[in-house]
Image (cartoon, rainbow, N blue to C red):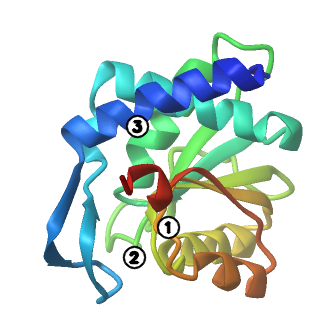
């Protein structure tokens, strides 16, 4: 696990990358939740940046180390690059984790699975899973992913978001029996 000083330095680096690549403020924008905000995060440019992806993965691995998950994943599309980065960086640690993603709906061909990324015959049943998300507003996407994973027999041991917009997701997760950990919050960008 990172020291407090190291963790703070990594977060500061990530905030600067997000501000440069993935954050807008000032004008009204409609969010996926339907809410209107003057703060907007599109974390894909940060998640697709080599340094950004590495920082995100490193901070998430630090946040979930004590949970000892077998897998990380979440709802497509936002969770896919996060899960891929986390599993890749975890390969260099003493606690490697696998990755998966949850489709919004099953395809009408192939295996017709909602859970993707696992080889034939492998399931999440009995596995410790952390749901990851890029930006959390109301928590609906992560709660949906967690329910799909629970339906597969997994034990969802936590939810980690890169940025919590502080719009009530914590209450939604608590109601679903989930614990939310935010790497950053909207307050880190209000200045």
Q: Quadrant of residue 3?
A: top right
Is residue 10 left or right of 71 when viewed as pictured? Answer: left
**Residue bearing mark 3:** 15
Q: Nearer the viewer, residue 6 or 123?
A: 6
Residue that appears at 41% across and 47% down: 80
Residue 49 drawn at (x, y percent):
28, 27
Residue 83 drawn at (x, y percent):
51, 41
Residue 184 drawn at (x, y percent):
53, 49
Callout 3 crowding tier (Cα within 10 Å): few <14, some 14–19, many ≥20: many
Task: Give the structural element (helix, strand or loop) at label 1.
Answer: loop
Q: Quadrant of residue 135?
A: bottom left
The reply to whether residue 104 is in sight is yes
In the picture, the disc for residue 114 is 1
Gap between marks 3 and 2, in whole Å? 33 Å
Q: Nearer the viewer, mark 3 or mark 2?
A: 3
Is residue 90 left or right of 14 when viewed as pictured? Answer: right
Q: Is residue 181 placed above or below 69 in the rendered structure?
A: below
In the picture, the disc for residue 105 is 2
Task: Give the structural element (helix, strand or loop) at label 3.
Answer: helix
């Amino acid at each position: 696990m990172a020291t407090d000083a190291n963790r703070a330095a990594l977060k500061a680096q990530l905030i600067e990358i997000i501000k440069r690549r993935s954050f807008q403020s000032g004008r009204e924008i409609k969010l996926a939740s339907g809410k209107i905000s003057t703060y907007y995060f599109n974390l894909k440019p940060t998640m697709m940046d080599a340094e950004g992806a590495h920082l995100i993965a490193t901070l998430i691995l630090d946040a979930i180390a004590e949970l000892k998950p077998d897998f990380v994943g979440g709802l497509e599309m936002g969770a896919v690059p996060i899960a891929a980065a986390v599993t890749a960086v975890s390969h260099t640690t003493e606690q490697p984790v696998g990755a998966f993603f949850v489709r919004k709906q099953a395809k009408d061909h192939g295996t017709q699975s909602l859970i993707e990324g696992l080889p034939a015959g492998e399931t999440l049943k009995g596995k410790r899973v952390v749901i990851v998300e890029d930006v959390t507003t109301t928590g609906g996407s992560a709660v949906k992913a967690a329910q799909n994973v629970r339906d597969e027999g997994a034990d969802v041991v936590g939810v980690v978001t890169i940025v919590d917009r502080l719009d009530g997701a914590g209450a939604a997760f608590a109601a679903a029996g989930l614990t939310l950990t935010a790497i950053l919050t909207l307050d880190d960008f209000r200045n």
